[in-house]
Amino acid sequence: MGKDPSKLNKKVSKKSSKNEPMDRITELRQVISQANHDYYSLDAPTISDSEFDSLFRELVNLESENPEFFSKDSPTQTLGSKLPRDNITFSEVEHREPMLSLQNALSIDEFIAFDKRNQKALGIEQCEYFLEYKFDGLGLELVYENGDLLEASTRGDGKVGENVTNNVLTIKEIPRRVELKGLPERFEVRGEVLIEIADFEKLNRQRVADGEPSFANPRNAAAGSLRQLDSKVTAQRPLSFFAYAISSPFDLKIATQVELMEILGKATFPIQKDYVVQSKPEKIFKWFDNLEMKRSQLPYEIDGAVIKLNSLAAQAELGSRSRTPRWAVALKFAPSEGFTKLLGISVQVGRTGTLTPVAELEAVEIGGVTVKRATLHNQDEIDRKDIRIGDTVVVRRQGDVIPAIVSVVESKRTGS
């Protein structure tokens, strides 16, 4: 990837020369574009989500402060990855309506600012919001014509995705035909493909038994499974799907996001049923805090909540920016993963004499806690994950669980 992204997360001096902001902007655009490619095209992220969010936000601020350096090709103006995929031969599908991303709210203050902007723009004193889980999976669009599933595609760069129809036909939860009065002749359903945690662990155990490398996390496993060139391989993977949107909802003569979810459910699409409608920020925050506490008890991985205006008319009135809607925001949890360097391996002796290898790490902050050590469990685990001193590794800390190394970023391995 060239320069180490962790060393790029620095502030630009206010006394910098005229060229320095442009140099930093260019540097950030390159790193973020490469990170997008690694994440969206290769299903192999090389920096953590929190680090990406920090770099992306810095780029947004720099471009806002220096409008003379605006570029329509900047990752702040585009979605996904525009870099070519390696050795992939999926045909392309142009989305009738762009598959947008979501603006992040990384604090309560940022959500309150989002709420106040909506109130001002709509000329109202209080907004009603639809709150749902933010799945950590892969975006998918399903095209139906005369009730039959015609085509399925990934998000891609937001405008053009990859045709994965044959693979999607292996996912039993996705209806091949929809019979529901009131649906337009052609419509698109959007949702998230994922693998539940129990299925992910079973899949990894089988891969290890077969002598294959394990997947780093459920999101990568889902993405890699959906983008197989051989649909027979996809059919063997335990993929799940949750629908959350439909194109042109006004054709359905409905007024709210709640009604939209009800229609999706009646049309036999799997939906996340634990959604909430709320107006008061303090109650939204309480719901979000409770969700974070029960996060580890869910059967699938989520990394936050999606908060949308419940009124479809209000959504239409606010519209969208180049890459994100103005009427929705992602409220994200504190990060549970971080990327850092493995400096060495020590051995911890338990009370019963059990020897446990421990990773000595370059300090990394995960979920508000500085992590310098992580368990490696045993020698078999080290061998299975091919963990080597000097590697860049992914460290996970969730709830009160002891930090552990979940995978190695092989693309950053130097051989030393």
Image (cartoon, rainbow, N blue to C red):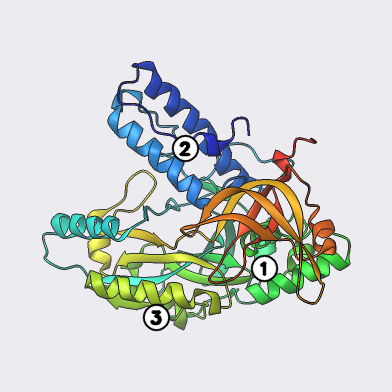
In this orientation, does residue 253 appear? no
Label of residue 262 in the image? 3
Residue wearing tag 2? 9
Position of residue 148 in the picture relative to residue 42 (left or right): left
Position of residue 164 in the picture relative to residue 52 (left or right): right
Dot 3 crowding, Cα within 10 Å, few <14, some 14–19, many 20+: few
In this orientation, does residue 269 appear? yes
Position of residue 269 in the picture relative to residue 128 (left or right): right
Residue beneath the point at 71% across and 55% down = 359
Which-is-in-front pick, marks 2 and 3? 2
SS of the residue at dot 2? loop
Amino acid at pointer 2 = Asn
Where in the figure is residue 339, as x and y percent of width and height?
60, 49
Judging depth in this view, the residue of 59 and 188 nearest the camera is 59
| Label 1–label 3 contact, CB within 8 A | no
Judging depth in this view, the residue of 369 and 193 nearest the camera is 369
| Label 2–label 1 contact, CB within 8 A | no
| Label 2–label 3 contact, CB within 8 A | no
Where in the figure is residue 13, as x and y percent of width and height?
35, 26
Whole-number angstrom distance, CA of label 2 to CA of label 1: 42 Å
Where in the figure is residue 76, as x and y percent of width and height?
41, 39
Label of residue 169 in the image? 1
Q: Earlier in the sequence, mark 2 or mark 3?
A: 2
Residue beneath the point at 36% across and 43% down = 322
Vertical side of 20 occupied by 327: above or below:
below
Where in the figure is residue 127, as x and y percent of width and height?
20, 67
Q: Given the current orientation, which residue lies at the most extreme bottom position? A: 266
Dot 2 crowding, Cα within 10 Å, few <14, some 14–19, many 20+: some
Q: Quadrant of the N terminus?
A: top right
- Quarter of the image holding residue 296? bottom right
